[in-house]
Amino acid sequence: MNRRRVLLSTAALAISGLMASGFAQSSNRIPLAQLESMFRDMRRKTKWNVDGPLLWGYFFVDPSREKLSKLADQLRAAGYSIVEIRRVPESSVMHQLHVERIELHTPGSLHDRNSELYDLAARLGVESYDGMDVGPALARAK
């Protein structure tokens, strides 16, 4: 896990503020313009082939570990790898589901993916789809 975090540190520059700024809350979705800016930053600040497949991580939070487990089952069936369900360190009640999948995205397709994930979380009563991170596809070899 630490190796992946190091590999994703550059991605954090590209997407910094997306989750912390409140854009990731279901009532205030990440706008397409923010994703376009993220892709411009990735092109400038990384050596990744942004036009090729990358390892995309997606995050959900809820107080109920059971709800996140049900969501994880659905996402696994859709081809996502489950990284972990963990208690959020800053919270005594919240849990986070982290899934990932190697995908090729443009800002528009990532916006569509985010919309799907926001809607899935809402259908299952999960408190929040909390945004994404990204790294080179080779990061999967942990």
Image (cartoon, rainbow, N blue to C red):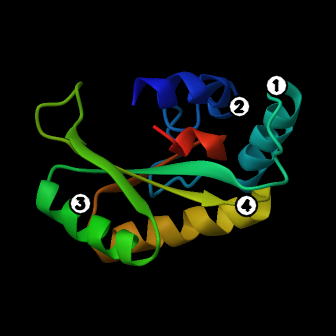
Q: Quadrant of residue 77?
A: bottom left
Kindly report the distance in space between the C-alpha atoms of the residues bearing marks 2 and 3: 27 Å
Under mark 3, the amino acid is Leu
Going from N to C along the chain, the mark reached first, 2 or 4, is 2
Q: Which mark is residue 104?
A: 4
* Residue behind mark 1: 45
Under mark 2, the amino acid is Ala
Q: Which mark is residue 14?
A: 2
In the shown orientation, is residue 85 left or right of residue 12?
A: left
> Mark 2 Cα within 10 Å, few/some/many (few <14, many 20+)?
many
Q: Which mark is residue 27?
A: none
Tell me whether circle 2 and circle 1 mark residues in contact (CB < 8 Å). Answer: yes
Under mark 1, the amino acid is Lys
> Mark 1 Cα within 10 Å, few/some/many (few <14, many 20+)?
few
Split into 4 quadrants, where in the image is the N terminus?
top left
Q: Quadrant of residue 26?
A: bottom left
